[in-house]
Image (cartoon, rainbow, N blue to C red):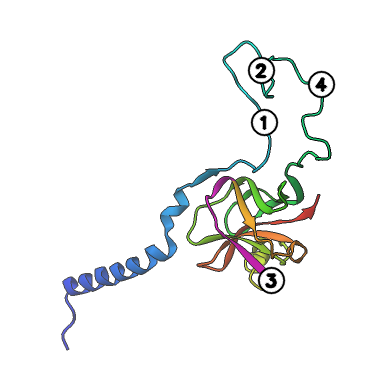
Amino acid sequence: MSTPSRRAVAVTVVAVAAVVAAVALPLFQPWRLFTDTVVDEALPGADPISMTTSSAAPPTISGDRSGTPSSGATEAPGKTQSRGPERLSTGRFITHEHDTQGTASIVRLADGSRILRLEGLDTSDGPDLEVWLSDAPVLEGKAGWHVFDDGRYRSLGQLKGNRGNQNYPIPASVELADFTSVSIWCNRFNVSFGAAKLLQV
């Protein structure tokens, strides 16, 4: 029986490597370890933090063109001023498979709807990342990597970006009391990049 030539062996190795690369690269997407997607969304209904103007005079905010402040109430009798966003619970992210920082908060808006608000998020980019509400405990280290699909969970959709401030609407049908944590969850490998325990404010 003849021994395969070095050329034949080399061709076989190259062919196998090409097949492995064709399968592994789309699956693992290793280049995403070096990419960032930054999203910076404002908190709905929140007042601006600051105002700038090129005029020496302060900007006029009310509808009074005289420039003098109004001493009376601006709302009709019997109406109450709408409330701004209210944080119901909040927590700080801890690292799981990938270094993760930032905070997660459940916020009730003035119209009664709820959002999950991520602020200062900084984690790795990755394939098939979602934002999950879960009833799983937030555990340090590898013990906490895979627990978030063991019990009750609710996906709020694909992660918009691995860095920044982001809002995720919470459906009205979701009972907030059922969920005590948030995870940046990688569906492809069933692992948490990072998670936060939600504590009532």
The label shown at residue 152 is: 3
Disc 1 versus disc 3: distance between alpha carbons?
37 Å
- Picture quadrant of residue 178: bottom right
Amino acid type shown at disc 3: Arg
The label shown at residue 141 is: none
The label shown at residue 65 is: 2
Farthest top residue?
Answer: 56
Question: Badge 4 local density, few (<14 within 10 Å), some, or many (20+)?
Answer: few
Farthest front residue?
Answer: 77
Q: Earlier in the sequence, mark 1 or mark 2?
A: 1
Residue 140 seen in render: no
Q: Residue at x 18, y 72 (%)?
A: 6
Disc 4 on helix, strand or loop? loop
Where does label 1 land, which residue? 49
Task: Between label 1 and label 2, give the one nearer the viewer.
Answer: 2
Question: Badge 2 local density, few (<14 within 10 Å), some, or many (20+)?
Answer: few
